Image (tube, grey):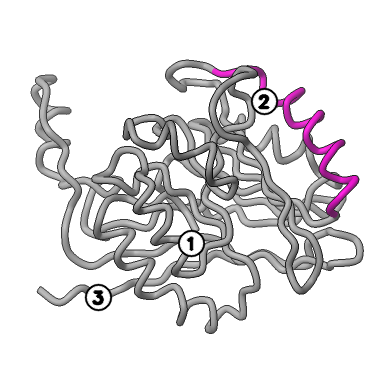
Amino acid sequence: MGDIVGEPGRSALISRLGALRQDLNADFIVVNGENSAAGRGITPKISIALMRAGVAVITTGDHIWDQRDIVPYIDTEPRLLRPINYPEGTPGQGSIVLETPKGKVGVINVQGRTFMNHPLDNPFPALDAEIAEMRKQAKIIFVDVHAETTSEKIAIGRYLDGRVSAVVGTHTHVQTADEQIFPAGTAFLCDAGMCGPDKSILGRTAQPIIQRFISGMPERFPVAKGNVRLCGALVTIEPVTGMAKAIERVNDLVEIPS
């Protein structure tokens, strides 16, 4: 599931996740939680709530450190990932392998560099090294590419084709319509979209953002309210080979009582 935006996004996902998992017949759930705390960062409490609801792994991105209490917590919870291409010595880890009833599943979180604040290490060699180690344990490998540009996400997806099961992008909050399986068997979607308010601009109240574009003056961008759209991707993977058999978009509208 794509980037969770604030309280509306996380509450809707937590309440709907059990039914959604059953409807999709999903075995393993990954969500991007980097905007789940008031639209910026994630807290230990939110991380725990998402995992109790059935999330296996939480990925993040450039807002991972926005909530100060996440720094001492992230070393205690290996299922909460930060991008793998942070420098050595950064708290937390960028990947994990978990045992499941259908075999081991690896998840890697990586961040792009183009148009991203505080550019991290080159994602390509970071992925090479991690995948080489991870493939010794797991054939099923899911990669969340948290990046701004479509070109960088597609380049990473093509680069990893045949070496991982799926590459799904996050960060832009806009679900793309380019789901496909690359020639060597890797499923790809440029951006999963967001889990956030439907009537919004990227999950935020629209008018202040419009005013910012008009005036160029600073504005506060509160998280919007109302119905929530839960967006993501469902990937079907052959456990023996680790290659994808199908990928489809998930786009579920949750009506919030007014």
Where are the magenta residues, as a range?
120-138
Q: Which mark is residue 51?
A: 1
Q: In the rendered structure, does residue 137 fall within the stretch colored magenta?
A: yes
Q: In this view, does 48 lie above or below 156?
A: below
Disc 1, SS:
helix
Q: In the rendered structure, does residue 225 fall within the stretch colored magenta?
A: no
How packed mark 3 is, by other alpha carbons closer than 10 Å (few <14, some 14-19, many 20 or more), is few
The residue at 50%/55% (across/down) is: 31
Q: Position of residue 155 (x, y in %)?
A: 69, 32
User: What type is the residue that disc 3 sits on?
Assistant: Glu
Would you name the residue on which mark 2 appears?
Answer: 123
Q: Where is residue 122 in the image (x, y as percent from the top left)?
A: 66, 19
Q: Which of marks 1 and 3 is in front?
A: 1
Q: Where is residue 196 in the image (x, y as percent from the top left)?
A: 31, 56
User: What type is the residue that disc 1 sits on?
Assistant: Met
Disc 3, SS:
loop
The residue at 51%/69% (across/down) is: 54
Would you name the residue on which mark 3 appears?
Answer: 255
Q: Position of residue 97 (x, y in %)?
A: 73, 51
Choose the circle earlier in sequence order: 2 or 1.
1
User: What type is the residue that disc 2 sits on?
Assistant: Pro
Q: Depth check: 143 or 206 in front?
A: 143
How packed mark 1 is, by other alpha carbons closer than 10 Å (few <14, some 14-19, many 20 or more), is some
The residues bearing labels 2 and 1 have C-alpha atoms spaced at a distance of: 27 Å
Q: Is residue 114 above or below residue 5?
A: above
Pointer 2 and pointer 1: residues touching (CB < 8 Å)? no
Choose the circle earlier in sequence order: 2 or 3.
2
Disc 2, SS:
helix
Q: Which of marks 2 and 1 is in front?
A: 1
- Please give left or right for residue 87 compared with residue 40 in the image: right
